[in-house]
Image (cartoon, rainbow, N blue to C red):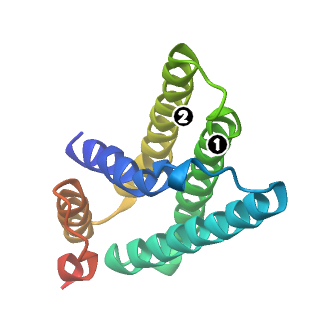
Amino acid sequence: MKVIAAVLTSTFLLSGAYAQPQDQSAGMQPTHSASSAAMMKADAKRNAQLERHIKDLHAALNITPSEESQWGNVVQTMRDSATELDRAIDKRKETINTATAVDNLSAYGVIAQAHVDGVKKLAAAFSPLYDSMPGDQKKIADEVFAQRAHGGKKMAKAAN
C-alpha cells in the first residue's frame, strides 16, 4: 500500500508540470498562429519532460529485461494519463479569456479528475510490476517514490 501511495504522489508531481498556467502577459491576446506555435512548443517540452522522467524512473528502479513487458504497461499508462491531462488543460486554455468563475471552477474539476483517474490507472499498472520485484528492488522502489513524494528529484541516489 505504501508504494501505491508513493506512485500516486509521483504521478501528481509528474503531472504538476502539465498544470502550469498559460502566460497572459500584459493582457495581450496572441494571434492564432502564435498561440498554436506556443502550444506546440509547450507540448514538445512536456513530452520531453515525460520521456526524461520515464527514462530516469526506469534506471532508478533497475528494471530488468524480464520486467520490461510489465514496465511497458506502466509507461503506456503514464503516457495515456499525460495525454488526458493535456486535453483537460488545453480545453481550459481555449476558454480562459471568456470563462466565468463557474466555468473556471468546472474546468479545474475536470483537470483534477484527470489527475485522479491517471493516478488510479497508474497504481493499477504499477502494482503487478511491484509485486513481481524481489525484495531488494522493492526497497529501491519504495525509496524512489518516497523521495519523489517529498519533492526529491534524485532518483539515481535511491538506486545506489
Label 1 Cα neighbours within 10 Å, binned few <14 / some 14-19 / many ≥20 = some
89 or 31, which is in the foreground? Answer: 31
Task: Tell me the quarter of the picture where residue 156 sits.
Answer: bottom left
83 or 58, which is in the foreground? Answer: 83
Residue 148's spot in the image, x, y percent? Answer: 24, 60
Q: In this view, does 84 lie to the left or right of 61?
A: right
Residue 117's spot in the image, x, y percent? Answer: 52, 32
Residue at 53% in and 24% down: 104
Question: Residue 114: which numbered mark, if any?
Answer: 2
Task: Tell me the quarter of the picture where residue 33 sits.
Answer: bottom right
Seen from this angle, which residue lies furthest right? 33
Question: Residue 99: which numbered mark, if any?
Answer: none
Report which residue position mark 1 lands on. Answer: 84
Q: Is residue 23 visible?
A: no
Identify the element where label 1 is drawn: helix
Of the 4 image quadrants, the one containing the C terminus is bottom left
Q: As shown in the figure, which amino acid type bears the numbered disc 2?
A: Ala
